[in-house]
Image: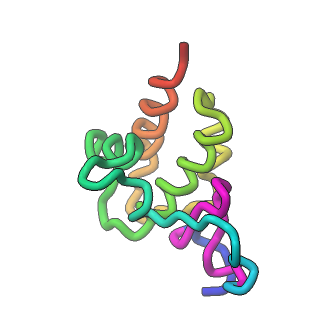
Amino acid sequence: CGEGLCGACTVLVDGVAERACLLDVAAMANRTVTTIEGLANGAQLHPLQQAFVDHDALQCGYCTPGMIMSAAGLLAAKPAASEAEIIAGLDGNLCRCGAHKRILQAVRAVAASSKP
């Protein structure tokens, strides 16, 4: 869209969540760009991907990649993020289906597994 409004196109650039629709392709040279497909380790889902399945945190699927990638960027920087930090970290991602509660549960579960 070139607007960066919904967050559905979120990718990790050098581990930081960025909106792909706002990125200049030439500026990505020599940088690591990770898409939703790059999170899994072969057939083994990334913990966030698995948590979204376990918590039924996807409905229509439109927002799911962006939500997971935003959460991955957040948890890479703050593995044991608080609920308030998770909410703030996902605030720019739109979900029209109303799966917010289950999305929050999924991300919270992964963050909780990182707490001592």
Q: Which residue is more in the foreground, 82 or 31? A: 31
The picture places residue 36, in percent across and down from the top left corner, at 44, 63
Residue at the far right: name it: 27
The picture places residue 114, in percent across and down from the top left corner, at 51, 24
Q: Is residue 57 magenta?
A: no
From the viewer's perspective, tell me whether residue 35 is left or right of residue 85: left
Give the residue drawn at x 41%, y 44%. Answer: 48
**Is 45 above or below relative to 4?**
above
Give the residue drawn at x 26%, y 40%. Answer: 54
- Can the viewer see residue 114 in this picture? yes
**Is 41 above or below relative to 84?**
below
- The number of numbered badges drawn on the structure is 0
Q: Which residue is more in the foreground, 85 or 115? A: 115
Residue at the far front: name it: 30
- Can the viewer see residue 83 in this picture? no
> Which part of the image, by quadrant, shows the N terminus?
bottom right
Residue at the far top: name it: 116
Q: In terms of image quadrants, where is residue 83?
A: top right
**Is 116 above or below relative to 21?**
above
**Is 24 above or below relative to 114?**
below
Give the residue drawn at x 67%, y 40%. Answer: 77
The picture places residue 24, in percent across and down from the top left corner, at 72, 84
Q: Which residues are magenta?
A: 8-24
The picture places residue 47, in percent across and down from the top left corner, at 38, 40
Give the residue drawn at x 50%, y 63%. Answer: 66
From the viewer's perspective, tell me whether residue 104 is left or right of residue 55: right
